[in-house]
Image (spheres, helix red, strand yellow):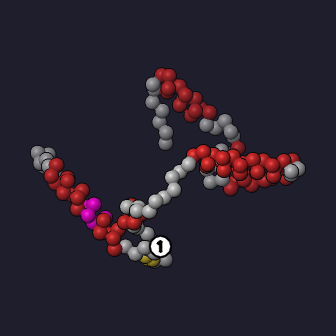
């Protein structure tokens, strides 16, 4: 590529516009149920999903918190009714079912202590912390 050749803003705008129009066209013609290729289902964002004309219910944090607290309280009540061994088994099953659970090598719960200490120090010393 010639280092003297510059990309003009007009060309960038043209490429972006063409890309948006192509995606908009795909949105309009892609079937709602998706398509199946080689045993895999493929879906594309629908125009109706982007331009929502329906009146959706607004998120109400107070109701969500109340509902969540109620479900947590019911779970605590259920666990209180169990024996200690049964409650421990339920807790272990629940922890293993959690997709966000962090697994430590050889159950060493101190494995990430140095990482968190470095994060804590970088707030004070402004040093970089690299995360791989």
The furthest residue to the top = 125
* Residue annotated with mark 1: 41
Residue bounds of the magenta highlight = 19-23
Q: Can you see residue 130?
A: yes
* Image location of residue 130, percent across then percent down: 47, 36
Magenta: predominant secondary structure element? Answer: helix
Quadrant for residue 118, please give it.
Answer: top right
Give the residue at x 31% y 64%.
Answer: 23
49 shown above or below 126: below
95 shown above or below 43: above
44 relative position to 81: left or right: left
Give the residue at x 40% y 62%.
Answer: 53
14 relative position to 103: left or right: left
Magenta stretch holds residue 112: no
104 relative position to 80: left or right: left
Numbered disc 1: secondary structure: strand
Magenta stretch holds residue 22: yes
Q: Nearer the viewer, residue 91 or 106?
A: 91
* Image location of residue 8, percent across then percent down: 14, 49
Give the residue at x 56% y 34%.
Answer: 115
19 shown above or below 106: below
45 relative position to 8: left or right: right
User: What is the tally of numbered marks visible in this picture?
Assistant: 1
How packed is label 1: few (under 14 Cα within 10 Å), some, or many (20 or more)?
few
* Image location of residue 63, percent across then percent down: 61, 48
């Amino acid at each position: 590529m010639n280092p003297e050749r510059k990309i003009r803003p007009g060309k960038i705008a043209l490429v972006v516009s063409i890309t948006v129009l192509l995606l908009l066209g795909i949105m309009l013609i892609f079937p709602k149920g998706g398509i199946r290729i080689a045993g895999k289902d493929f879906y594309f964002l629908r125009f109706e999903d982007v331009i929502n004309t329906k009146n959706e219910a607004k998120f109400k944090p107070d109701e969500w918190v109340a509902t969540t607290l109620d479900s947590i309280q019911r779970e605590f009540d259920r666990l209180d009714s169990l024996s200690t061994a049964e409650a421990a088994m339920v807790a272990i099953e629940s922890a293993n079912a959690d997709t966000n659970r962090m697994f430590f090598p050889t159950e060493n719960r101190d494995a990430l202590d140095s990482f968190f200490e470095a994060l804590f120090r970088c707030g004070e010393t402004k040093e970089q912390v690299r995360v791989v």
